[in-house]
Amino acid sequence: MRKIFAASICIFIASLAAFAQNTSVYTSTKTSSCRTISSNPNEAGSYEGECLGVGGYKVRLLEGDIRQTLNIVTPAKKKFELDFWGFFPSFSSIGEKIEWRTKSGVPVALIARYNVADPEGVKKDISYLMVSKIGKTQSCVTDIVKPGANQNADARVLADAASTKPCKKTE
């Protein structure tokens, strides 16, 4: 009887731990999937589009001078600039899919692929993962994950801890 009771307790605790873990939801940043807010094809061009997020959040994809970044828009319409191009001034592009880390359906972090061109134009692009904490009162970049064998897994671990981290400063 004690063994059954102890096993039941262990299963209950394990199920609570599994329930409390963050999960991933993916959304698109393809311009064809986003609502165009403004677009100017002249010179280096500019674009601003609003893409669907999760939990009432949206993402604004911004492009100017062949550089891209994201802004977060909360359900209350508050906007937070993630300022990716402040970390890397070279030509850049956002990956076509972003990963939202959610807890009980509420976004707590975002992982976006950020492809940065070599300023000399000699080497191939470097593909970073930008990790940002997401919240009603603050959203900002907390970590930048360099390319590597465990890049995606490392980014998820950092994203799941992002809410306790300070915002990363641009250089």
Image: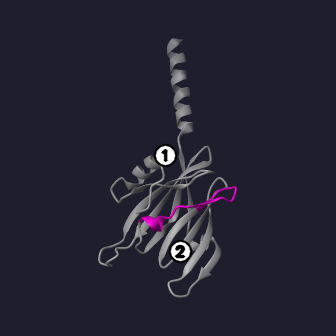
Please indicate whether residue 151 sits to the left or right of residue 52 in the image: left
Local crowd at mark 2 within 10 Å, few (<14), some, or many (≥20)? many
Earlier sequence position, callout 2 versus callout 1: 2
Assess whether residue 22 is covered by the magenta stretch: no
Distance in Å between CA atoms under marks 2 and 1: 28 Å
Q: Is residue 41 above or below residue 37?
A: below
Q: Is residue 152 left or right of residue 106?
A: left
Evaluate if marks 2 and 1 touch, with contact meaning CB atoms under 8 Å apart: no
Q: Which residues are magenta?
A: 72-87
Residue drawn at x 54%, y 22% is 9
Q: Amino acid at mark 2?
A: Glu
Q: Would you call the spot at circle 1 few (<14 residues within 10 Å), some (14-19), or many (20 or more)? A: many
For the view shown, which residue lies furthest in the top direction? 1
Q: Which residue is mark 2?
A: 63
Element at badge 2?
strand
Magenta span includes 75:
yes
Secondary structure beneath dot 1 equals helix
In the picture, which quadrant includes the N terminus? top right
Q: Position of residue 47 (x, y in %)?
A: 58, 77
Q: How many marks?
A: 2
| Residue 9 vertical position relative to residue 81 in the rendered view, above or below | above
Circle 1 sits on which residue? 160
Q: Nearer the viewer, residue 72 or 137?
A: 137
> Which x, y percent locates residue 77?
68, 59
